[in-house]
Structures are given as C-alpha cells and as structure tokens.
Amino acid sequence: MEAAEKQSELKMPLEQELDRNSGEMNDLTEVEKKVLSKFDKFVMPQMALLVLFAYLDRTNIGNARVFGFEEDTGMHGTQFNDVSMYFYISYVVFETPWVLAVKKFGPGRVLAIAIISWSFITLGTGFVHSYGQVIACRVLLGFFEAGLFPSLTFVVSQIYPPASQGKRVAVLYVSIALSGALGGLIAYGIQSMGARHGLSAWRWLFIIEGAISLVIGAVCWLSLPTSPQTAWFLSEEEKSTMILIKERNHPFKETEGFSWKQVVMALTDPLVWLASVSLFCASIALFGFGTFLPTLLKGLDYTSLQANYLSIPVYVLASILTAATTYVSDRLNRRAICLIHSPLLVIVGYAIVVGTGHKAAGFFAMFLVGGGVYSFNTVLVTWVSNNMQPDYKRSVAISMLISLANASGMAASQIYPIRDAPRYVMGNAISLGGEVLALVCVGLIYALLKYRMRQKEKLIAEGKDTNGREGDQSLEFKYVF
C-alpha cells in the first residue's frame, strides 16, 4: 500500500505539468529532484572530463605544430593538413557503431575502454618519428574517440527531462571550449619548459596529456553506471523513481532490441538531414578554429609562445558564452531563437579577418568566432534530441547528425594550407560561408516543425485519435521550438 502511494506521488506531476514535449519546464517532485541531482553529482563531472580530455588529446596537435612537431616528424607541404583529415575519416566511419554499443552494453565499460585506448595512442604519439607513424596514431585516435560525444548526448537524453537537457549538453560543449584553454595553458608551460631527458617539448605535450587521460579512463571504468535505472549510487526507491521518470519522459512504447525500422525512420527524416547540413556547415568553423587557432594567431604576427597563451582567454570567453546561451535557451524554453545570434557572431568575426590583416582586429575577431561556434552546436544538438522519438531513432539520428558534422573536419583540415600563410583568407572565407548556410538551415528546420505541428493539429481538430504513425510523428508528440 505504501509503495503504491509513493508511485502515485511520483506520477502526480504528470497531471500538473505542461506537455513533456513542449519544452516547458516540468514540475518535479522533491524525490525526482534528489535523484537527478545525484546524476549531476556523480555522472556529469565524469562526462565533462571525458569530453575535455578527448578534445585535448584531439587538438593538441595544433599546439604542437607551432613548436617543432612538423619539422621533427619530417612533414612538409600539406602533410599536416592530411594528418588532421585522416583523423576525421576514421572518426566518421566508426561513430555510429560506438553509439549502438553504448545503447546495448551501457556507457560505463564501453566509454572507459575507449578513453583508456585513446590515452595510450596519445601517449604513444610522443614517440613518433615519421609521417607514417603520425598517420597511424591519428587514425587509431579517431577510431577510439569516434562515439564519445554522440554517446554522451544520448545518455543525457535518457536521464533528464527534455527541458533540462540543454544545460547538460552545454556542459559537454563548455568542456570542449575549456579543453582549448587548458590545452593552451599546458602547451605554454611545456613549451617554456623546453626539451627534457632527450625529448623535445612537443613530445612531452602528448606524453603528459595522454597519461592524465589514462588515469581518468581508469576512474570511469569503475564509476560510470551501466544504465540510469541501475546506477550504483541510487537506492532501490531511487531506481524505481528513475524508471518512472523514463516512462513519463518517453511515453511511447520502445523496442527493447535493435530495430532497423527506427534506423530507417531516422535516415528518412528531413529534420535529421537539415540539422546535419546545418551542423556540417557550422562545424567547418568549429573544427578549423579548434585545430588551427594557434596557427591563425601566429599568422597575425604573434610568436609561437604567444600563440599558445593568447588562445587561453579566447577559449575562456567561448566557455562563458556557451554556458550563457544554453542557460537562456533552457530558461526561455526556446531553441530556435537562441540559435540565431551564435552564427552572427562567427560571421562578423570571420568577416573582420577576411577584410583586414590588422593584428589587434584579428585577435578581437577570434573572440567573436569562439563565442559563437560552440554555443550554436550545443543548442542545435539539444533541439534535435528533444524532437526525436523512439530511443533507437534518437540514438541513430544524433550519431548521424554528429557523424556528418564531423565529416566537416575533413574539409576544415584542408582549408588552411601553409601556402595561405599568414592571413589564411581562403579558410576564413569558407568558414564564413558555412555559418551563413547553417543559419539558413535553422530557418528551414523551424518551418518544417511548424508545418508538422499544423498537420497534427488539423487531424486532432477533425476528431482523429491517431495518424497511424509512431514516435515523434504520432499525434501525441508535440515539438520543441
């Protein structure tokens, strides 16, 4: 009797809250708030660290470039750009299989295996001596890092109500921006340290960062739960609460096993393709910025040492603006309107560096670009996640979305050839154009969701109980705008 009363109490907010898919802030019981706060305490910090060091290990090649990496490994011409491209080829190919593995086996073991593996690869990069060895390391790094971000985004969607997901995904994107600041700080310190024990400074950069990642991977192996409903830090009552939260936030019947039908649903949804194009275009700037910022700063006539430490405040501001944008998005319960200002900042920033080679103006422009590239991706990924059901459709959609976005890394790696130094006008102009297209796609996504909502409202007004469709395209599902 007492258990039944507790379940009734937990389900009561269903009658009081606005529709779970509307994106409005849901009323949560104290028990539910307590349970979700435990995930904020035990899971989100680990996820943030995973992302921070994944991107640190991915982009440290850009920091290493400005103090001898190319020369010591015998690279010349566009070979550095090619090395960056091979990483993204591997990354894109293996992204979706990793996400499906997380869905099947749970995040704990799968992600721990991934980070331990890429940590050894990063550490090993500190001992390479040839172009071929660098390529091998980058391909393996791409393989093991491939599923991290879409997997974590999927995990967030399984734990938190839609109206609360934005700020959690933002934590992951803030971690990406902070990885740039931390990477610049570490690179500055190691470059100042110079060669030690017969190893060049850039080699110590990979060795030290790889070793730190290895420790974090071991911790995650022991502490990341297999599933939200069976987390080790929850009591039996709290586990029951998580089951009820999942039933409420995902009210449509889920297929427990793998479903090709849901894969096809994701692959044939125009919303997924529009979002993928938007994220692809925006991510050209994101990946170009993340990898080549020290190169761009050096091109503005700063020294290699200055290029590393001047990147720190750029990334710090990017982190602050990413967090602020997502906070406003969740506070207003609106996604589309918060997606508009981000590409505008990037467009203005790149317009400045394309239009002038002035040193101070170029440095200021980097702050504008950093302030927009991360926050745009944060809100867009959350928006798509909010509007996808059932589970497998969402997991495939998110992985497809981010896979195609990461394919832009292949383009971004080629748009800053050394022959364009010092101003790199072509790369900056392409990034500017990509942001314009990303902004156009946001408008098209909004129009598509409005059209679908009107079609559903028309059927409901005609007295229809169902349209014969499931998941996010059923009559019961209301889109987040």
Image (cartoon, grey):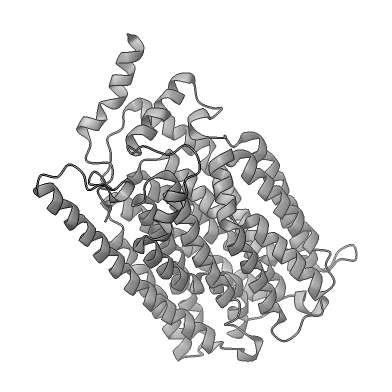
Residue at 69% across / 65% down in the picture?
187
- In this view, the residue farthest toward the top is 1
Picture quarter containing residue 406? bottom right
Q: Position of residue 473 (x, y in %)?
A: 29, 51
Q: Position of residue 65 (x, y in %)?
A: 71, 75
Which quarter of the rendered picture does the N terminus lie within?
top left
> In the visual, does 250 lie left or right of 259?
left
Q: Position of residue 62 (x, y in %)?
A: 66, 71
Which quarter of the rendered picture does the C terminus lie within?
bottom left
Which residue is at the front of the view, 271 or 376?
271
- In this view, the residue farthest toward the left is 462
Q: What is the tally of numbered marks visible in this picture?
A: 0
> In the visual, does 145 lie left or right of 350?
right
Which residue is at the front of the view, 432 or 195?
432
Which residue is at the front of the view, 384 or 301?
384
Residue at 9% across / 49% down in the picture?
462
435 to 266, vertically: above or below = below
> In the visual, does 238 lie left or right of 312?
left
55 to 194, vertically: above or below = above
Residue 57 in sight in this render? no
24 to 320, vertically: above or below = above
257 to 361, vertically: above or below = above
Residue at 50% across / 74% down in the picture?
284
Q: Position of residue 397 (x, y in %)?
A: 44, 56
Residue at 58% across / 80% down in the picture?
296
Residue 274 in sight in this render? yes
